[in-house]
Image (spheres, rainbow, N blue to C red):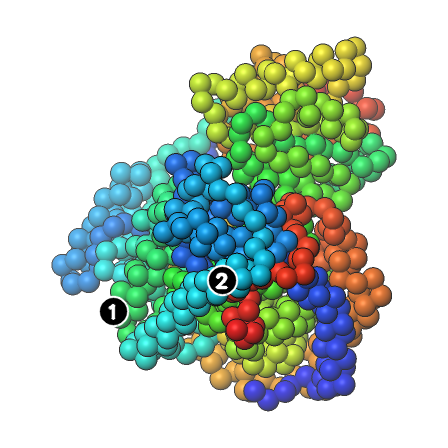
Amino acid sequence: MEPKLGLDPAVVREARELARAAGQPIVELARTHTTVSVERAVLRLAGLDGADEDGMPWVNRLADAVRESAGLEHGVALPAWDALLTGEFSSLAVLARDAAAGKVKFRVPEGRDAAAARTAASVALGRGIAAIDARRAERDAMIRETSDPPKPWIYLIVATGDIYEDIPQAQAAAREGADIIAVIRSTGQSLLDYVPEGATREGYAGTYATRENFRLMRAALDDVSRELGRYVRLTNYASGLCMPEIAALAGLERLDMMLNDCMYGIIFRDINPRRTFIDQRFSRQVHARAGIVINTGEDNYLTTADAVDAAHTVVVSQLLNEFFGQEAGLADAQLGLGHAFEINPEVPDSFVLELAHAQLVRELFPNAPLKYMPPTKHMTGNVFAGYLLDAFFNLAGVMTDQSILLIGMMTEGIHTPFLSDRDLALENVRYVARAAGQLGENFRPPPGGLVQRRAHQVLGEAVDLLRRIGGDGLLGAIADGTFGITRRPADGGRGLDGVIARADGYYNPAIDILEGVS
Amino acid sequence: MTQSAPAAPARVIRPYGDTTGDGRVQLSFTLPVAFGSEEERALAEGAALQLAGSMGLDPAMVVHAKGMGPDFTFFIVYGRVGHLVDLSKVTVARREFPLLSAAEVNLRIRTGLGRKLVVLGACIGTDAHTVGIDAILNVKGHAGEKGLEYYREMRVVNLGAQVGVDDLVARTRAEHADAVLVSQVVTQREAHLAGAREVAAAFRAGQPGGRRPLLVVGGPRFDPAMAGDLGVDKIFGRGTTPREVASYLVHALAPAREAAHVGGAGDRA
C-alpha cells in the first residue's frame, strides 16, 4: 500500500514510543498478578470440563476450593497437581468433585513434591497447548482444502439466542457471501464469573458462548466452507470476567477471530481495570498461539463520544492495543484493530472526514487486518436513508483498503436483522466493491487538502493525549474518563476480588509454555 | 399510559401516493418460497399477490422479486388500499411523561436539581440475573440506547445481584440516593411481587415520616398498572429502554422549571 497522507514518520514513531511507555507498567502489573479466571483457564487447558448439577463449572469449583485452603498466590497448578499425585485421584474431574464436596485439603507443595507436581502439570498443559496447535494446523489445512477469500472479508452477525437457530442462519449468511460469522453473546455474559456449559437455546439478545456452542457452530461452518469452496471464519467474544477461559476454549475449538479489546470491558461493562488487563495478557498469549485474529473495540468509543471530537482516542486505543498485542506475542496479521464510520451525517464534509480517519488508520497499521464498523449511532429508522449511509460506509471501506467490513443493516436499532435486511446489505457491499474496486488506487488526497489536514490533526491530538497519559499512567487516564467519556477508577468495578498478587514461586505451566520458558 | 383523543375536526383520509385519495402504499416482505425455475417464480409472485390481496391491496403489483438462497423470496409490492382513516377515531397512547434525549435529561437535572441525580440499582432476593438492571444502568445499554451511567448528570451505583433488602436500604441512605431501581427477572410463584412489596415496606419503615427515595421496580413479569398496589412509584415492564427510565426519573425528581408557571392543564393530564 502506497502512503497517501504524507504522515511524518518521526511523529508516528513518537506515538508508538509513547504507547509503549503508557502500556509498560500495565504489562508489569499483569506479570506480577494472576486472576481466578487465568487459573481456571489453566485447568480448562489441562482438560477439565463439565459442571456440577447446578451448572457451576468444575473449574470454578476446583479453583475456589484451592483458593480457600491453599490460596492462589502460587497458581492453581502446584496445589492441584500435588493433590492429584498425593491423593491418587484418577483425573482432575474426580479431584474437582471431591474438592467441591470439601473432601480435599490442598497445600502448596515444597521440595520434591513441588517438583513432581510441576512435572505432572507441565505434561498436562503440554497436551492442552498441543491440542491448540493441532487446531491451528487443522485451520491451515481447511484453508488449503477450500480457499482463503479475498479481502475485504465480509463480516455478518447472527444472534438468535438459540444455537440451533443460529446454525442455519449462519450457513445461509455464508451462502449469501459472508466470510466471517460472529455469534453475538447473550447480554450480560461478560459479567458472569463462569462460562456456561453445553448447547444453549435461551439467551438475551444473543447466544451464550459455551464450548459446545463453539464446537457445533465451527462444525456447521466447516460443512458450508466445503460446500462453497471458501473458508468461513467464526468469531466470538473473549471479553468480560472469563476472558482467559473463553480464549482457551476458542483455541481448543478452532475459532478464527475473537473480540478482545484492552479497555472495552472496563469502559462499557464496569469490569475492574486491573482484572481486565491481567486477564487480557493471558488471553492474548493464547490467541497468539492459536493463530486467532483479535478484533479490538475502538468503534464502541464513538457510540458514546462524538466521532469527530474523539477520533484521536480511537487512534490512542489502537496504539495501546497494538503494543499490548505484540507484547503478548500476537503478529501484526493477528491485530484486527477496530474503528467505525460514526460521524453525524449532518456535519459538512462528514464523508471526507471519514475517509481521512479510515486512511489514517490504514497507514498507521499497514499490516493489520483492520476491522471497520458501519454506522449505528445515526441510523434513524429511516431505512432508505440508512441504506444510503451504509453504501457510503462501504465506499469508504473499499477506498481505504479496510480488511474486515462489518456489514451495516438498514434496520440497525429497529430489530435483529430480517433475512431480507441481510440480503440487501450484501447486495449493497457487492455493488460498491464492483463499482469502485479501483477507486482507492486512483484516490490521491492532495497535500494541504482536507483529508491530509484532518489526518495530521487527529494524529497530532493522539500524540498529545498519549503525552498526557504518560504523566498520569494509563490507569489514571481511564479513571479520568479519557476513553468513551466514562470514568473507571482502578479499584472500582467488578472482579477486583478475583485479582491475586503472585507470590515468589508462582507457577503457571500454560504461561511457561506460551512464553517459551519450558 | 392514558388514552386521549385529540379534539380535531372529523376528517377521513386515505394514503397519498401522488394524487389525493389514490390510496397507494408500498410494502416489502419475504416468503419462504423458492424463486428458481419459471414455474417457481410464477408461484412465488402469485403467493405475494395473494398475501397483498388479503392485506387489502387492490390492485397490487409485485415490482421486485428476488430469490434469497434456495428457499426464500423477497418482494417489493405497490398497491392501492381501500381503507379509510377516520382521524376523529384515532386513539393515541401517551406516557405520563415526555421522552427526553440524554442532553435534555442532563439539562433538566442541572436546572431542576442543581446537583447530580443519584441512582442506586440492584437485583434483590435470590435473583442472580442482572441482565435487566445492567441493560438499564451499564454504559453499554440496551436497544441502541446507552445506559444511565452514560448520563453525565447522574451518579449510578449498581449493587449487582442478590442484594438483601436491609443492605439496599442502608446503601440508599449512605449514598443519598434519589431513586432506587430494583430489578426482578427470574421469579417463581410470584416472588417478584413479594420482593417489590418487601422493598416498599422496608423503605417505609426505614424512613418513617421522612423523605424516601423514588422507588422503581422493573422486570418482564411485572404489570405496570400495579405500582400503587405494590407500594412503589413506578413499574417498568418488558422492553423498557434506559431512556424511558431516565426520562421518568427527571419527570419525577427534577421537574421542568417552566411547568411550575404553566400550572393546570398541560402537564397534569
Report the residue that reaches farthest toward the bottom.
A2
Instruction: Confirm or deny contact between disc 2 and disc 1 (CB under 8 A).
Output: no
What percent of the width, then of the height, locates residue B168? Answer: 68, 26
Residue A121 drawn above or below residue B134: below
User: Mark 1 packing: few (<14 Cα in 10 Å), some, or many (20+)?
Assistant: few
For label 2, the SS is: helix
Quarter residue A146 falls in: bottom left
- Residues at marks 2 and 1, CA–CA distance in whole angstroms: 49 Å
Q: Chain of mark 2?
A: A
In this view of the protein, which residue sits in the foreground, A129 or A106?
A: A106
Question: Residue B173: x, y in percent?
Answer: 77, 25
Can you say whether A394 is above or below B153 in the image?
below
Instruction: Using the rendered view, name the quadrant where residue A228 is placed.
Output: bottom left
Judge by depth and name the residue closer to the eye, A52 or B52.
A52
Q: Residue at x 66, y 72 (%)?
A: A323
Q: Which residue is mark 2?
A: A116
Q: Position of B2 compared to A313: left or right?
A: left
| Labels 2, 1: one chain | yes
- The one nearer the camera, B78 or A3, is A3
Looking at the image, residue A269 sits to the left or right of residue B20; the answer is right
Q: Which residue is mark 1?
A: A227
Relative vertical location of residue B80 with respect to residue B173 in this rendering, above or below: below
Chain letter of mark 1 equals: A
Q: What quarter of the picture does the N terminus of chain A occupy?
A: bottom right
